């Protein structure tokens, strides 16, 4: 008995995930969870942030976009230009596909924007 997890299919960083659908896909996969900070004495917490970055393709012939973590992180920090980093960062990857005619991959970043105390 394997429970709810499908044996044999593992997403990034060993997180379990369902198989992509043959006709359509709309799933979000966990990609990364950063170690959590234990003390805020060396940082000024600016606020919670969320950002995303998307890349798409049509007919698996034409691709465009940037779904990298750096692009999603830059999007997350746009409201805090003075921030130095995102701590307690979690990253998910969302896949959407319709008959492989249209495919999109979106990287989503969440965490706390911080500025290091000098």
Image (cartoon, grey):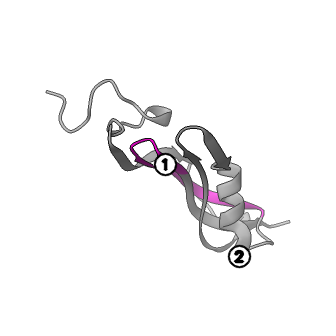
Q: Position of residue 72 (x, y in %)?
A: 65, 57
Q: Residue at 49% of width from left, 48% of height from top?
A: 102
Depth check: 105 or 97 in front? 97
Which label sits on residue 102? 1
Q: Residues within 10 Å of mark 2 (few under 14, many from 20)?
A: some
Depth check: 59 or 50 in front? 59
Horizontal relation, residue 110 to residue 1: left or right: right
Q: Residue at 86% of width from left, 65% of height from top?
A: 118
Q: Is residue 39 visible?
A: yes
Q: Residue at 60% of width from left, 38% of height from top?
A: 61
Secondary structure type for disc 2: helix
Residue on which the image places disc 2: 79
Q: From this viewpoint, which residue is outermost toward the right?
A: 118
Depth check: 114 or 19 in front? 19
Q: Residue at 35% of width from left, 46% of height from top?
A: 24
Query: From which residue to which does the magenta span run?
Result: 84-105
Does the CB distance between marks 1 and 2 fall below 8 Å?
no
Lower position in the chain sequence, tag 1 or tag 2 = 2
Please state which of the two labelled residues, at mark 1 or mark 2, is closer to the viewer: 1
């Amino acid at each position: 008995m394997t429970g709810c997890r499908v044996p044999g299919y593992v997403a990034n960083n060993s997180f379990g995930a369902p198989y992509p659908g043959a006709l359509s896909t709309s799933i979000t996969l966990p990609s990364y969870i950063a170690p959590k900070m234990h003390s805020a004495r060396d940082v000024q917490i600016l606020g919670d942030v969320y950002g995303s970055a998307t890349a798409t393709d049509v007919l698996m012939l034409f691709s465009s976009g940037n779904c990298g973590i750096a692009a999603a992180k830059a999007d997350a920090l746009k409201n805090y230009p003075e921030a130095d980093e995102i701590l307690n960062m979690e990253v998910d990857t969302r896949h959407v596909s319709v008959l492989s005619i249209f495919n999109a991959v979106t990287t989503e970043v969440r965490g706390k924007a911080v500025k290091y105390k000098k």
